Image (tube, rainbow, N blue to C red):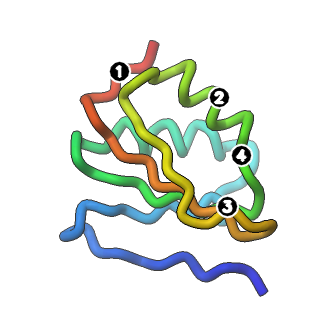
Amino acid sequence: MPHDCPTPTADTGVYPFDARGVAKRFRHAAIFGALEALHPGETMRFCNDHDPLPLLAQIQHRYGPYFRATYVSRTEGQVIIDFLAVEEATPQ
């Protein structure tokens, strides 16, 4: 059974992003846009059905130290990563 991503409220500074509902063609662009919308101290809780290692490398290359990624869940079919904005994001 797929993981049901928690839906925290904006009051906590954690915003859910369920990539499973975004067409693959638009997925990375949508993720980058969501990350860029975060303010320092806010977190995007990213949910996916697989471990997005290429995406993590792209985020590191594109944004450098602006985001900290922390796995919340890393099981097959149930990957959740919190992306904490530590500074204002400006793409390179």
Q: Amino acid at mark 4?
A: Pro
Camera-near label (3 vs 2) is 2
Q: Residues within 10 Å of mark 2 (few under 14, many from 20)?
A: few
Are there few (<14), some (14-19), or many (20+) residues within 10 Å of tag 1?
few
On screen, 92 above or below 30?
above
Residue 52: give its label.
Answer: 4
Q: Amino acid at mark 2?
A: Ala
Cβ atoms under marks 1 and 2 closer than 8 Å: no
Q: Position of residue 49 (x, y in %)?
A: 74, 64
Give the Cα distance between marks 1 and 2: 16 Å
Structural distance between the alpha carbons of marks 1 and 3: 24 Å
Residue in the foreground of this view, choosing between 25 and 89? 89
Residue that appears at 42% across and 77% down: 7
Give the residue drawn at x 65%, y 57%.
22
x, y percent for residue 86: 28, 36
The residues bearing labels 3 and 2 have C-alpha atoms spaced at a distance of: 16 Å
Circle 2 sits on which residue? 57
Q: For mark 3, what is the residue?
A: 48
First reached walking from the N terminus: tag 4 or tag 2? 4
